[in-house]
Image (cartoon, rainbow, N blue to C red):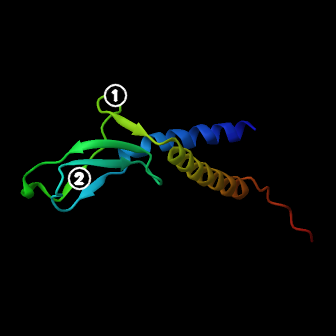
Amino acid sequence: MKKYIVMTIISLLISLATPFIFKNYVEQKPEQLEQSFRFGGPIPFAEQQKLLPASSNAYPLEVLFESPIQTKTIFHPVSFIFSSLVFFILVLSIFTVLKSYFGKIPSKRRQ
């Protein structure tokens, strides 16, 4: 039971870190400069409003996630739960494979 709690905490921490890792890209200048971007992965769950530059020379543009303390951020809880679930399944599968690989005790050959 403890290992599932640890894996849940690890998957939640990974999910909370993904908006800072994954970025959004804008290739061309959009008609409306005030845009809403969703960050996170594998299912984006954090949404922020960004004001894009007016100059068309600034594109292609990489849009980064800013701290929720500094910028108004809308969190989508259902997307966050699914994202955490994906990471939980990934961590569980990696843990299971490693445990089965390293946990086997070699048996003696019968002669």
Foreground residue among 94 and 111: 94
Horizontal side of residue 9 vs 27, given as left or right: right
Which residue is denoted by mark 2 in the rendering? Answer: 62
Q: In terms of image quadrants, where is residue 5?
A: top right
Secondary structure under the numbered disc 2 in the rendered image: strand
Seen at 32% across and 51% down, the residue is 23
- Quadrant of the rendering where the N terminus is positioned: top right
x, y percentage for residue 48?
32, 41
Which residue is denoted by mark 1 in the rendering? Answer: 69
- Quadrant of the rendering where the C terminus is positioned: bottom right
Secondary structure under the numbered disc 1 in the rendered image: loop
x, y percentage for residue 4?
69, 41
Q: Amino acid at mark 1?
A: Ile
Horizontal side of residue 33 vs 7, given as left or right: left
Foreground residue among 80 and 15: 80
Question: Image height check: is 75 above or below 43?
Answer: above
Name the residue at the bottom extreme: 111
Name the residue at the right extreme: 111
Q: Residues within 10 Å of mark 1 (few under 14, many from 20)?
A: few
Question: Image height check: is 68 above or below 23?
Answer: above
Q: In terms of image quadrants, where is residue 47?
A: top left
Seen at 39% across and 38% down, the residue is 74
Horizontal side of residue 89 vs 104, given as left or right: left
x, y percentage for residue 86?
57, 53
Q: CA distance from mark 1 to mark 2?
A: 21 Å
Seen at 79% across and 59% down, the residue is 106
Foreground residue among 53 and 33: 33
Name the residue at the front extreme: 32
x, y percentage for residue 92?
65, 51
Q: Residues within 10 Å of mark 2 (few under 14, many from 20)?
A: few
Q: Amino acid at mark 2?
A: Glu
